[in-house]
Image: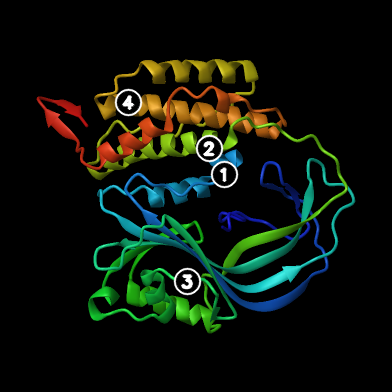
Amino acid sequence: MIWGCLGRECKLGWGYNKFLHRTVPISGEFPTTGSFRNWKEYWWYNLSPADIVHSEWISHSLEPTYRKLLDFQNITDGNQYWQFHYCFIQQRFRTNEHLNYLSGCTHFVSCVDNGVDLWVQFPKMGFPESQEKVRWISFTNLVSSKYEYFQVEELFKNRNFDRDQKKVRCRILLNYREVKELTLEELTQFMIELEKGKPSENIALVEFLYRKLDNKIRQIVINNEVEFIKFLTYLYCVYRKIEMKMEDVKYSDILPDLDSDEKSFTSICMNLDKAKEDYRSMDRINFLSMYPVLKKLFFSYIDYIRYSVERFHDIDDGDHLPGTIDELKSWLLQLDTRFLININGECSL
């Protein structure tokens, strides 16, 4: 899967820290060569309501564009959806030059690919089913790969939709920036025009490649990173699903994002410990009372991760999570059937 740019800026010659999956901006321009490509890939996901496609890098939790993807996937109607991630690469640029010393970097950005990055959702109803949860297929030079296809993939490969399928509404997240709604017929026409080389205002940076530097830097140790990012992902999605339901009815008590500029690591850790204790002891019946506790815990983690990443501190909190991923998933499922109600001036969810 391409997690490369996540809608962020990245330029040739910039530094890259492989351990943290973060780029480091560098001033200056470097000689480049360009070439045209006609390459695309799909990743298909067979999603249930509590399924979220997530990154495996803890540093991505700091990126607003990553949270935009999580919001896009945070299904609120309880239905099941096909989801696919489509990347089309139109043009590639390369450089072999970089600064002699790039502080805190293991690699430098040697290649950037421009094109379109789409995440697409559409209802499963009316389309073939599959038992597999995820599927990767590649198309090179518009020629299909050797992989066998799901039936629904075959429909997209051949653009062979029936009249009703063409009218199905789907949601797309375009370049991690903008959410749109199109019919499948409109979507496939957009993809066809891209692949035929028609100029598009939607061309953007999609991914980057990198080459190793001779620098030797200390690797940050991140304990239990995969479980940590999964916990953070579902924690975010639960509080955001509550928040989305509050936004839908214009509920007034929505909290602002709780990013802080705290500089003391001792204070950051004390705030995180307090947030974890509040999480363990919170009322697990009323989602409205859970909401501020969940949001506070998420942003306490963000403060802790940001401070650690920027100062190359080891991160061990993945070994001390205050709850389970399964519990968070169960709350996501419950929220699909819960609605804000007001009884004698008292609201509950």
Gap in angstroms between the C-alphas marked 4 and 2: 21 Å
Q: Residue at x 84, y 50 (%)?
A: 213
The residue beneath circle 4 is: 290
Above or below, 268 relative to 91:
above
Give the side of residue 120 with respect to residue 340, left or right. right
Q: Residue at x 33, y 40 (%)?
A: 241
Residue 189, located in which quarter of the rendered image?
Answer: bottom left
Q: Which of the marked residues, 1 or 3, is nearer the chain's N terminus?
A: 1
The residue beneath circle 1 is: 56
Q: Position of residue 5 (x, y in %)?
A: 61, 56
Give the side of residue 347 with respect to residue 25, left or right. left
Q: Which of the marked residues, 3 or 4, is nearer the chain's N terminus?
A: 3
Q: Nearer the viewer, residue 62 or 249?
A: 62
Element marked by disc 1: loop
Q: Which of the marked residues, 2 or 3, is nearer the chain's N terminus?
A: 3
Q: Which of the marked residues, 1 or 4, is nearer the chain's N terminus?
A: 1
Element marked by disc 4: helix
Amino acid at the residue labelled 4: Met
Amino acid at the residue labelled 3: Glu
